[in-house]
Every structure is written in structure tokens, then in C-alpha cells.
Amino acid sequence: MASTFEVEESRSVSEEVNETEECPVKQVEFTVPKTDDPTMPILTFRMWFLGVVSCVLLSFVNQFFWYRTQPLSVTSISAQIAVVPIGHFMARTLPTRVFFKDTRLEFSLNRGPFNIKEHVLITIFANSGAGTVYATHILSAVKLMYKRKLSFLPALLVMLTTQVLGFGWAGLFRKFLVEPGEMWWPSNLVQVSLFSALHEKDKRPKGGTTRTQFFLLVLISGLAYYVLPGYLFSMLTSFSWLCWLAPKSILVQQLGSGLKGLGIAAFGFDWSTISSYLGSPLASPWFATANIAVGFLIIMYVMTPITYWLNAYDAKKFPIFSSKLFMGNGSVYDISSIVDSNFHLDRNAYSKKGPIHLSTFFAMTYGLGFATLSATIVHVMLFHGREIWMQSKKAFVDNKKIDIHTRLMRRYKSVPMWWFHIILVVNIALIIFSCEYYIESLQLPWWGVLLACAISIFFTLPIGIIAATTNQAPGLNIITEYIIGYMYPERPVANMCFKVYGYISMTQALTFLQDFKLGHYMKIPPRTMFMAQVVGTIVSVIVYTITAWWLMGTIPDLCDTSKLPPDSPWTCPMDNVFYDASVIWGLLGPRRIFGDLGEYSNVNWFFLGGAIAPLLVWLAHKAFPSQTWIPLIHMPILLGATSMMPPATAVNFTSWIIVGFLSGFVAYRYRPEWWKRYNYVLSGGLDAGTAFMTILLFLSLGSYNISLNWWGNNLEGCPLASCPTAKGIVVKGCPVH
């Protein structure tokens, strides 16, 4: 054992001589330390206790808030902050006695001071509970909206297998998406910066603050401020002042509403509004922010108004911005009336009621999803094809050029590929068994499972490259719905399951790879990281499923907006979008919407447009190589800018873009030292402060229905923004033209 540590120490010394080596990405060079201490204890009692508790608490809280009208996503940053004083307290008070000394079972409750590597692993556990399980949408749609039976065991199997399947893809693509220095995963730098701030021991600079002091100031300020938008003055969530200029004008309110319209001049003075759907704007590279801004401006302020006011597809019969499904007279479609007893489409009932109509924006959102998919493939081939090919050839060559962080990680044993292969094979077998055994409930045949896996593995690498360099990841939800909708129509649950297995397994793979990169930056042994990810994922899925099942059985009319009171907090906006998609792609099938039997067949031309767009950028770059801004035009990001709309709204984007500009362009260019020291710490402090106060407000006031009724809590004051403008259309609360 001693000789092994001597080798480790000598390698550490020889490698850290190269600390002056620069990383290929400036933001990484600014943020990530180039040192490592391999002697730090990691698998401690503190780590296991705090990690599992953090995972359970965050899983419960996030699933609890999932169904609410203003869904709250408590990120792992909250746990990352909270465990620091607890970890130090445990280090001071737990007994240091060593059990089974000098044996393989040697164990102690207290192995010295609380250290940064323990902290990282606790955060990895917390990451497993940060967010929710996408497959929860299936449970909500079947039980709450279609109102069909679904037993607990198949629900648990779907939840578990969707989360674990991504491990297989993650193992296959580690060489490409973790080890290269160019694959830097921008949002990880928020975590790295925060870890450094919480464990640094530097002195306060003259006239300034340490990063720990700055974080505490932001945390306290953010926590105190959120009382305003969270309780006292909720209009700050979407400050749509343009609506106030003409309180009786539908046009002005369509233009000015940040929640139901185009959101011109609307802004959210609320960190949850700014960061809820696109993540922290402080963690987004400026070129990605700029691409999203251009895409949003073109889609929201050029394409949407033109198609609406030209009345494309009878757009004026419906709201300008909505994800609901409508009848030809402008009323909301009653989906339950066209579902037969076998949970398939009742064709006779559908022919009598007439076709389903979409708002123009919703239809265009699907078209842009088509374009994003084809643009992703062409963009990666043109701009990254050579690097992928070279990396493929060198994947098993040890003497290739590596950055300093990869060199430091070479001292630890990597995770064997057969670990990933076993998880992958066992998981796919379990999925096939579940779908075949519970075929009446899940509807998806065995070949659908294999096809979903094939789609997911094909897209993991190109979309992973985009996510690792831009902090944005185009989704596969639309293409998976499209494929299975044509191949296996009129089965809504099969469509939902196929989408989840084809889309979420890729998303989970990217999450695991991002965590691997965080461990790479923080020098966590890969096998230890793998263990934390697997255990955290399994624990979180169990908690998510039990919490969702409990809420579905406890809250009356959960998610049913037709029966809930107008001010109910349990309207489930994300689940309703998922449900509407299952109707479009599963119950009806794309042929009745975007095919020869539907009204929106022209939307398919977006596939071609998306493929051509990156080619034009590439040709322009070749024609004008001296223009360095041309290759920064990132068509998959630009075309997919509004992929989160709905349920995201215009105010989420306008606020996010403005803050992203101030951070990524103004501060980064004109105050680089401030940006380097405080930018990511600021993001973490705002996340933590907002999350803590949101939970506190709910527990102390919201759970007891204690609220303030005054005009400042009337959201944004744009009641006419969702009204139709076609002649003769009657909608409750709207004037008739």
C-alpha cells in the first residue's frame, strides 16, 4: 500500500509541474483548479448520510412542486450550500474511533475534516433528485387526463428503466464527451466555482469580498427579495406594462403579455422567471445566448405575427400563443369524447366532431422542432465531422494530446466498459419484459423498444457535442413522436412510452456525462462517481414514484383545469402540454395532423429548411474565412431557440436574454476579473436564495392558503391576450368581433 501511494505522489508531483499549461477553453482556464490531492478520503459516513438525505429531500420537493401552476425546480445548488455547515459540524462532533483497523473492513464515522471531494459526491447524489422523472408525464396523462387504470408496478418499472437506460449510452461516449478539453459543459463551471468559494481560505481583497462572503451576500439578498415576487407583489413575475396602455385592446395585450402573448417590453424581476426553463443565463456562453436571442426574435416577432395576421390555418380563431387543442369554432376540444373503450381512437366520433386545430404558434413550434433535428445532424457533420473522425481513430490511443485535467485523472482507475454493457443489456431486457407483460397498459411492442434505443444512441453524440459546448441541448421528443405515430398510430400510451425511451435515455446519458465531467474537473475517481450516480438514480426514482402516486390519490381533480377553481395551484402546465402532444402524435397520429389526412402538411418542409440552414453558414464560412463571427452562427441553437415554448412563455426568454447579455457580453468583455471571480458564484447564490425562500413561503403561507388579494398580485393584468380576433368567435371573457 505504501509503495502505491509513493507512486501516486510521484506522479502527482510530475504532473502538477505542468500547471502553467493552458486549457483550450478560457472559461475553464479561469475557473477550474489544476491541482489534485489523491489522499483525500471520499467514501465517508458523512458523504453517504448527507448524500442520500439530500437525494431523498430534493426528489420529494421537486416532485411535489411538479404539478403546480408555477412549478419550482429546486436545483442541487441548494443542497450543495446547505450541507457545508452540517458536514463541518459532523467532522467536529462524530467519534473518530476506527473499527476493524488494518483490515479490508476498516471503518470510521469521522475520517478527518470535511473536504471538497466528499462535497462533490454529495452534490452528485443531490443532482439525482434535482428536477423530476420525465416518465411521470405518462402516469399523469393516463391516470389524471385520460382517466384510465394504471397499476403501481408497471409505473415504477417505466420510471426506473427510463432513468437507468442512459447509463449505457454514457459509457459508450465518455471518450468523446468527457476527456477532450474542448467538451467543457459550461453549466459545470457554476458548480466548480461554488465549490471553490465554499472551501476557499483566501483573504478578503482590499475593498472587496472573498467569494464565500460574496455568495452569502447574494444568498441573503436573493432570499429576502423573493418575498416580493413570491408573495407580496407577484406581478413582478411578468411585468407586462404595455398591456396597461390599452386595457380594452386585444391587439395591444397580444403584443405586450409576457405570459400569453409576444411579450414585447415584458420583463420578469424574479430569478425563477429568468432561469426556470433555459437554466441560468449566467452559465450560458455569449455566442449561445446570442443565437437563442436571434432565434427568439425571428420566431416570436417576425414569423408568429406574420402567420397570425395573415390568418394562416385560421389562426385568428384561436389565441396567438397557446398549447391547447381546438375545434373549428374556436372552443377547446373535448378529447375524452373521441377515445374508445380500448384506449384507441374512436374514428366515428372523431369524424363527427371534426379535426383538431392548433394555434399557429403551436404548429410552428413543431415545425421548428423538425428543422432543429435535421439542422443538428448537418451542423455536426459539417463543423465537427473531422474532429469526431479523428477522435474515433484515437479513442484507444493513450499518447494522444490531452489537457491537464485529463492527465491528472489518469492516476485513477476508469470505469470498465463491461459495467455499462451489463446495465444496458439488463435494462433493455427489463423494458421489453415490462412492455410485453403489461401490453394492455403500456401498448408498446418489443420492436418499438429496440427502435427507440436505436434513435437515442444515434443522436447522443451529435447532441452531446452541442450540449457540451453551448449549454443547450436540442430534444428528440418531436422526432420520436413522429416516427412511432406513423408506424403505430391511435395508441397514445405507446407513443408516450416510445418518446420517453427514445428521448429521455439520451437526456439521461447527457446528464450522466455532465456529472462525469464535473467529477473530471474536481478529480473524483471515476468508479466512485459511477457508484454515486447509480445509487442516487435508483433512490430518487423510488421517491419520485411514491410521491407522484401519493399526490394523485390525495389531491382532488389534480391537473383537471375544467374542474379546478381558477386560482388553484395544481393545474400541471407541463403535464398538459405532454398530454396534448400524446393526442396529436399518439391518439390521432401525425398523418391526421401533418400528413395527407391533416391540415398542417406544409409544416414538413421545415425538415428541408433545417438541413439547408447549417450548409449556408458553412459555405459562408468557407467563402469568407477571415470573418470569425460566421462560424458562431449555430443553426441548431437558433432554430431550436423556442423549443421550450410552451410551457415556457415570452417573458422567460426576454428576461433570460437581457441578463445573459449583461453577463456573457458586458461583464465578460469589460470586467473580466470580476466575471472570473464572481459570475458563477452569483448564479449559485441566486438559485439557492430563491429556492430556500420559495419553500419557506409555501410551508408557512401557501400550504395554509394565506394570500394577499390586491391588484399587484393579479399576475400581469393582460386578460384579453388569449382572446381570438376572428369574426363571430365566442369565448368566455372575450369581446365578440
Image (spheres, rainbow, N blue to C red):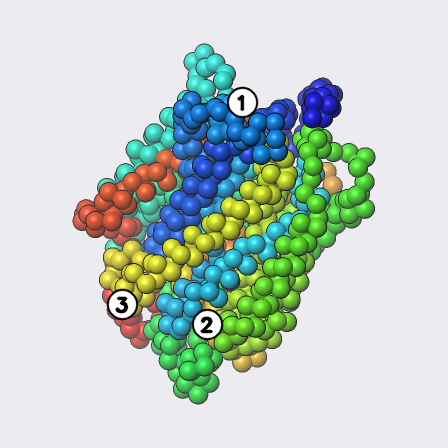
Q: Are the residues flagged by discs 2 and 3 in contact, CB closer than 8 Å?
A: no
Q: Which residue is mark 1?
A: 673
**Residue drawn at (63%, 59%) of the image:** 426
- Residue 302 got which mark? none
Q: Amino acid at mark 2?
A: Val
x then y, percent, for residue 181: 68, 36
x then y, percent, for residue 54: 43, 41
- Left or right? Give the position of 513 relative to 206: right
Indicate the secondary structure of the residue bearing disc 3: loop
Rate crowding at label 3 as few (under 14), some (14 to 19) or many (20 or more) other CA atoms within 10 Å. few
- The quarter of the picture where the C terminus appears is bottom left
x then y, percent, for residue 431: 58, 64
Which one is nearer the viewer's eye here, 620 or 90?
90
How far apart are labels 3 and 1 at the CA level?
A: 55 Å
Q: Amino acid at mark 3?
A: Lys
- The quarter of the picture where the N terminus appears is top right
Q: Is residue 55 above or below residue 302?
A: above
Q: Is residue 291 above or below residue 457?
A: above
x then y, percent, for residue 121: 53, 36
- Left or right? Give the position of 407 relative to 351: right
- Left or right? Give the position of 387 relative to 277: right
Marks 2 and 3, the one that precedes in the sequence: 3
Q: Amino acid at mark 1?
A: Glu
